[in-house]
Image (tube, helix red, strand yellow):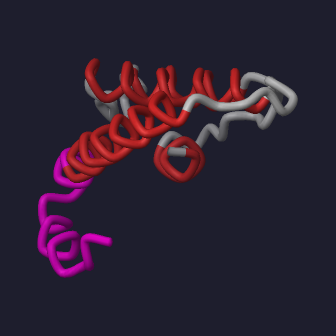
């Protein structure tokens, strides 16, 4: 997403204390005259939930994690990544319809 902001929007998101949230919001919105939004509502919500969990746990200062919650977040992260992958493919097609040929040649992992 940072590459989209820098190279397509030609407007990088500054790496300040809230840059992850800013970047998600930027990708969730159109960039007028340049591109449609990158992230669907569902993808935005999923990635923002992961971001919030990461931020909260990173700042827990060693409190023990609940394994069941972590496993659930892992499943959510895998689903969110697949949604993100589809959103990026959609963006690539809107920018360059021939890009799908190249995307399909790449390994899925």
Q: In percent of the image, x 50 and y 40: which residue is there? A: 9
Q: In the rendered view, would you say 16 is above or below 82?
A: above
Q: How many marks?
A: 0
Residue drawn at the location 50% of the way across and 44% of the way down: 1
User: Residue extending furthest right?
Assistant: 61
* Position in image of residue 52 (x %, y %): 59, 21
Image: 12 above or below 57: below
Q: Position of residue 21 (x, y in %)?
A: 61, 23
Q: Is residue 14 above or below residue 10?
A: above
Question: In the displayed structure, does residue 21 sit left or right of residue 63?
Answer: left
Quadrant location, the C terminus: bottom left
Looking at the picture, tell me which residue is in the foreground, 65 or 96. 65
Residue at the location (25% across, 71% down)? Answer: 108
Left or right? Give the position of 75 relative to 6: left
Image position, residue 61 (x, y; %): 87, 28
On the picture, is 92 further left or further right than 63?
A: left
The rendered magenta stretch, by its main secondary structure, is classed as: helix
In the figure, is residue 25 to the left or right of 11? Answer: left
The magenta stretch spans residue 94: yes
**Residue 100: percent from the left, percent from the top?**
14, 65
Numbered range of the magenta stretch: 90-109
Let me know if residue 91 is in the magenta part. yes
Q: Residue at x 39, y 20 (%)?
A: 29
Q: Who is closer to the viewer here, 20 or 38?
A: 20
């Amino acid at each position: 997403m940072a590459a989209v902001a820098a190279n397509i929007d030609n407007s990088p998101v500054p790496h300040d204390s809230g840059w992850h949230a800013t970047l998600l919001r930027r990708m969730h919105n159109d960039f007028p005259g340049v591109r449609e939004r990158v992230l669907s509502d569902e993808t935005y919500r999923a990635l923002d939930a992961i971001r919030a969990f990461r931020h909260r746990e990173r700042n827990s200062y060693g409190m023990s994690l609940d394994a069941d919650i972590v496993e659930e977040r892992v499943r959510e992260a895998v689903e969110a990544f697949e949604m993100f992958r589809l959103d990026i493919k959609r963006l690539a097609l809107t920018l360059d319809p021939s890009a799908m040929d190249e995307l399909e040649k790449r390994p899925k992992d």
